[in-house]
Image: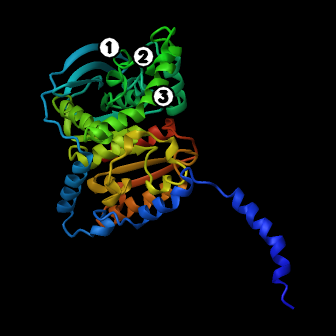
Amino acid sequence: MDIGWLVLPVALPMLLHAAQDAPKSDMGNYFPFLNDYSTSLVRSMSYSEAKPSDLEAWRTQCRAKFQELLAYSPAPVTPEAEVLEEVARPGYKRIKLRYRITADRTTEAYLLVPDGLKGPAPAIVALHCHSGLYYYGKEKIVEVENPSGVLKDLWTGAYGGRVPADELARQGFVVFVPDAFYFGSQRLDVDRIPESFTRELDGLEAGSDAWIRAYNGVASKHESLMAKTIFSAGATWPGIMLQGDTASLDYLLTRPEVDPERIGCIGLSIGGYRSALLSAMDRRIKAAVVAGWMTTFQSLMFDHLHSHTWMLYVPRQQQFFDLPDAVTFSAPNPLMVINCERDSLFTMDGMRAAESKIRAVYTGIGAPGAFTCKYYDVHHSLGIEAQNDAIAWFRTALK
C-alpha cells in the first residue's frame, strides 16, 4: 500500500515552518541573482586564475589594473610639512605634523620617535580604525593627553586599553600615524554643509562628549551621500584613502630617523583594509599586519554588508580580484593576518576562505613561511595579546 499521501499532510506544515524559520538575506528576493552573478565571476587576474610564470610582471599588471579601478591619481606634490607640536613622552618623542597630500588638501599625523636612536630605524605606518568615530583619526591609536570619554571607550573596547602606536614606539620602531580622509583633521566640516544635516548638534557644547557623539551620527548619515558624490566625481573612496596613505609614506621617507628598506604597516578594521591596500600597492612597504579585515567579499553579501562602511567599495574589482587576491600583490613580502573568532562583521567561512587564498599564493611562489594567519577568541579588536604577536612579527619581518 502506498502511504505517501498520508505523510504529506503532516510533512508539509513542517516544511513550511522550516522555510519560515530559515535565515533571510538582507537583500531578500534580490539576493539569488546577485549571488549567482558574483559566483560566476572568475577574478581573472587573481594568482589562481592567471597562474603567472613571471611573478614580477603579474604584480605590475595587477597594480596597474587596480590603480585604474581606484580611479584617483592626482598629481604628486611636495609635502611642505610643518611641525605643530612636540611632546616628550616616556621612551619616545611625539611630533604632530601637518603636510600637503594633494595640491588642494592637507592632512595631519603623529610621528613617534623612540629615544636613543643611533641611526635609521625600522618604521611602522600605523593606520587608525573607523569604529563609527569620525571626529578623531590618529588619536584613536596614539596616547593623547586629556582624552574624551568617547576616546577612552574606544581605546578600551578596540585595543584592550593599550593603543598600539605608542607601544610600537616604546619597542624601538619609528611610528607614523596619519589621519585618513573623512577623519580627524580631514573630517567633515559641519559649518560648511546645510543646517538640515546638522540639527542633532543644536544646543550642544562643541567638543563635549555629547557633541562628539552627535557629530559622529551626523558624519555617519552623511557617509552615503559622500560616497555617491565621490562616485559621481569619477573617483572611489578607497582610491582617495590610498592616495593619502601613499602621500604620507612619501613624507615619512624624508625623515632621517627612518630606514627606507625597513618599513611596515598595521591597522585594525578600516585600518586593516588600508594596511592591505598600502602593502599591496606600494613597493616601499616591506611587511604588513592586517587586523580585523580579511575576508572574501562574497561571504558578506547574504546578511553582513549592512554593518560595513562605504569606504571599501571599488566598482568592478570583483571581475579581476577579491580582497585576499589583492593583498597578494606584495608576496612574498611578510604578511600577518589577525582574525577575531567572535567578529560580527565577518563570517568564519569568509575569513577561512581568504586565509586559504592567500596561503595558496605564498605556497605557490615558494614562501609559505612569509605568511601567517592567527585567530583570537575575541570580538572585533586588536587587543594586547594580538598587539604583542604583531610586534614580534615585525621584529622578525623587518629584522
> Which residue carries the number 2 mark?
195
> Which image quadrant for residue 206?
top left
- Circles 1, 3 touching at the beta carbon (< 8 Å): no
Label 1 sits on residue: 87
Of residues 315 and 390, the one nearer the viewer is 315
Instruction: Look at the numbered disc 3 and give the secondary structure of its residue.
Output: loop
Q: Is any part of residue 273 visible from this angle?
A: yes
Residue at mark 1 to residue at mark 2: CA–CA distance: 38 Å
In terms of secondary structure, where does tag 1 sit?
strand
Measuring 51% from the left and 33% from the top, which residue is drawn there?
158
Q: Is residue 6 above or below residue 2?
A: above
Task: Identify the disc placed on residue 118.
Answer: none
* Contact, mark 3 vs mark 2 (Cβ under 8 Å): no
Q: Residues within 10 Å of mark 1 (few under 14, many from 20)?
A: few
Q: Amino acid at mark 2?
A: Glu
The residue wearing badge 3 is: 162
